[in-house]
Image (spheres, helix red, strand yellow):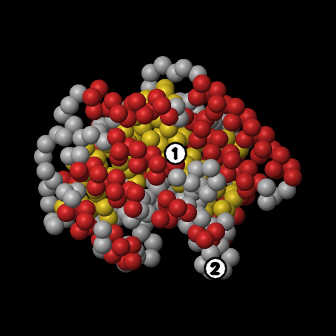
Amino acid sequence: MHHEDGDPTATTVATATAPLIRWVRRRGSPVQGNLVDLLSNGQEYFPALIEAIDAARVHVVLETYIYADDAVGARVTDALIRAAQRGVDVRLVVDGFGAGDMPATLASRLRDGGVRLEVFRPVRGFRLARRHLRRLHRKMAVIDDNVAFVGGINIIDDHNYGPLELPEVGPRYDFAVRVRGPLVAQIALASARLWFRMAQQRGLRETAAAFAEVETLTTAARQARREHHEGGVAAALLLRDNLRNRRTIEREYLYALGAARHDVIIANAYFLPGTKMRRALLACRERGVRVRLLLQGMVEYRLQHFATHALYARLLEAGIEIYEYEASFLHAKVAVIDNSWATVGSSNLDPFSLLLAREANVAVYDPGFAGMLRARLERAMAQRSARVVP
């Protein structure tokens, strides 16, 4: 069904962005001076990623939840090996569950080609314990500390749905960002900290080298934050882990929703937010803010599907608009508020992402970027989705 017309952000940009901009200055965590490009689906993401890897001269770090043995995985593998054979330090970290079906032949090919492959929390038998659910769900890449990628896109073909028996459907609907500028130093530091954590299991020499790298990148990230950067946009890296960043992504969402004055669009593949998030969405409606949710329209995980649908009645009653994406599987984890704040990343709004997994989002505080993402989401709601009728 078609969504309603009209522009709820028809105020001036200055008025619409004021609450969020004041918060940005107070927090001090976003850094100015970045170039942030929005990438839709693998069609835009993989050519950009491979181009950056092919240009690498010093190092490449790639983290992913899934690394598929398909045509896309082969292209990325070839690029990583090409870089390693040029003398580039190439690191690949995959999750032990998400990439648990990686063939031994593919792992051997990567390692034989010079890629330093590590598996985060390998799965050895099935034991239902909280620590085994703490997966590496984030998707990040850093090349030569001058370009980085963060988003929701795994290393897998957009049309590869694995064992699911599906009719002919389109590519997954997903997003990533390419970042250039001072924020890259923080993304590089996050990857180095994970590598250090894993190096501790490999012996003293590797641990010492990884620690030295973390120290160097910590200094670089602090310096980048202190320096004044002209132009570009303000952006922040939002991490979720089980150490210092347990609630960072959730808090960012909650404040952005609390500051919303005109319009909220959230597109999220696995939507099962907690009480605080649901209250924040309902509070937006009480203030007269238009709230639109773009959610999964195809059944992937049946229990999750029914749990999400159980929330619909209260949300619809409050006037929240719900659209279900029907053209293919929705895999996006993005949001836009008041054409001034946007986030793109790996974090769903469900207990797995908000309470257990390692996640990474980028928040961008820029009307131009927010407007671009908003336009793509509105097009998806209008042309490839059905509105849920109360």
The reply to whether residue 335 is visible in this rendering is yes
Closer-to-camera residue (74/195)? 195
Measured as percent of width and height from the top left, residue 148 is found at: 54, 40
Q: Position of residue 65 (x, y in %)?
A: 55, 60
Q: Are marks 1 and 2 in contact (CB under 8 Å)?
A: no
- Which disc is residue 238 wearing? 1
From the viewer's perspective, is 90 left or right of 228?
right
164 sits to left or right of 293: right
Q: Tag 1's secondary structure?
A: strand
User: At which x and y percent is residue 239?
Assistant: 55, 48
| Residue at the image point whose x is 34% and y is 53% from the top | 280
Q: What amino acid is found at the position of numbered circle 1 in the picture?
A: Leu
Across and down, in percent, residue 353 comes to 49, 60
Q: Earlier in the sequence, mark 1 or mark 2?
A: 2
Q: Is residue 376 above or below residue 314?
A: above
Q: Is residue 330 above or below residue 237?
A: below
26 versus 47 height, above or below: above
Q: Quadrant of the C terminus?
A: bottom left
Report the Cα–Cα distance between label 1 and label 2: 30 Å
Residue type pointed to by label 2: Arg
Task: Report the side of 255 relative to 309 (left or right).
Answer: right
Which residue carries the number 2 mark? 127
Confirm whether residue 155 shows in the render.
no
Dot 2 falls on a residue whose secondary structure is: loop
Crowding near the residue tagged with mark 1, few <14, some 14–19, many ≥20 C-alpha atoms within 10 Å: many
Q: Residue at x 77, y 54 (%)?
A: 199
